[in-house]
Image (cartoon, rainbow, N blue to C red):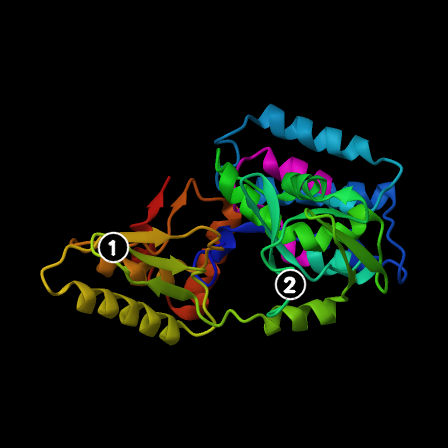
Amino acid sequence: MIGRIGLSFLVLWFSLSFSTQAQPRPTQIDFLSGDQIHTDLDSLRAWILAAHPSPFVHCSEIEFEDAWEKSRKTFEGGGTLFSEAQMVARICNTLKDSHTGLSLRSFSMQLGEVYGHIPIEVTTVQNQMMIEFADANSPLNGTEVVAVNGVPARSILGSALPLISQEGDAQVARLRMAEKLWNDIAPFVVGARLGDTVIIELADGTVEKLPVFSNEEVAWWNESKDRSESIEWFLPEKPNEPAVLKIHDFHPSNASDFKRQLRRAFQAMYNWSKEDEDLDLILDLRGNSGGHIAVMAELLPYISNEPIRIPYGAQIRTSNTAKDQLAFRQRRLGMRSQRYSTNLKK
């Protein structure tokens, strides 16, 4: 997601909050009527057609309309929040545009109100579901999870994948985003709810019991993770070995700290290699969750001999909605129209 770039209004992430906010569900009841789902899907379709600058680059208008009609018919009698999320994702994913999709944070929080979250994070390694983080000192860290309440861990991941938007054929990026959603949808998939305890089955045959966390508890759990450093680096232990720079994300809580860590990493590599030693560098972005383009740009001077200019933003075949919002910004903030027109292609 683009973040706070000036053209963020082009990023169309849709929250499940059209009619459902106007008609709140009773506490602990997860059911939307067919009319509610239809209203939401109709609003979604209208917003995409109005706001998306070029929706039919990767699909035809016929395919888009067909996905919308089939989504409306699937749950005519009503369904759960998860059911509606599947239909929203079906419509959005037809576009094959990673900036047009289900708002995962909003969906996670709404689903968590009823079903909660499992306090573990997973990552896929050689077709195995590994627990990346449970607690700072948990014995579960680094172990393989095979099932939750008897439901295969990979089946839970399979339920998350269709909800993730995709840019073209970027399958790996889609998988990594699905892993982030895994512990949020797991309680729903395995039939658990807030206040329950789930059984985590490990590959070695042992089992662990974990509580289902509320939204407030999982927010505290996320803050407690020992991941304050966005950057790690490893110098060679022997001659002719490469250095490794691992960047976990490009959305640090403190941008100044990120720059300082980056400077220290390359200073350490320079000091190691200044004895006329050639030093190869492996840039490890596995599991990197993305972030702000301006933070990414901080890396470029260290790895390129040529200056690289990153464009502020671009619109191609801009929509009327985007034009109206740009005009409003120009009137309110005094932006000169010429400043933006260099990145505008019709």
Q: Which of 168 and 13 is in front in this view?
A: 168
The image shows residue 34 at horizontal and vertical percentages of 86, 41
Say which mark, if any, is on residue 129: none
Q: Is residue 202 above or below residue 235?
A: above
- The kind of residue tagged 2 is Pro
Q: What residue type is labelled 1?
A: Arg
Q: Is residue 107 visible?
A: no
* Residue that appears at 70% across and 41% down: 159
Residue placed under numbered mark 1 in the picture: 309
User: Which stretch did the figure color magenta?
Assistant: 86-106
Instruction: Tell whether 94 sits left or right of 186.
Output: left
> Image check: 284 left or right of 123?
left
Q: Which residue is drawn at 51% across and 46% down?
A: 320
**Nearer-the-camera pick, 242 or 264:** 242
Residue at the (74%, 33%) spot, across then down: 71
Please indicate, yes or no, whether residue 171 appears anywhere in the rendered image: yes
Q: Quadrant of the C terminus?
A: top left
Is residue 105 magenta-colored?
yes
Q: Tell me the crowding category of disc 2: few under 14, some 14 to 19, or many 20 or more residues within 10 angstroms, Cα based.
A: few
For disc 2, the marked residue is: 139
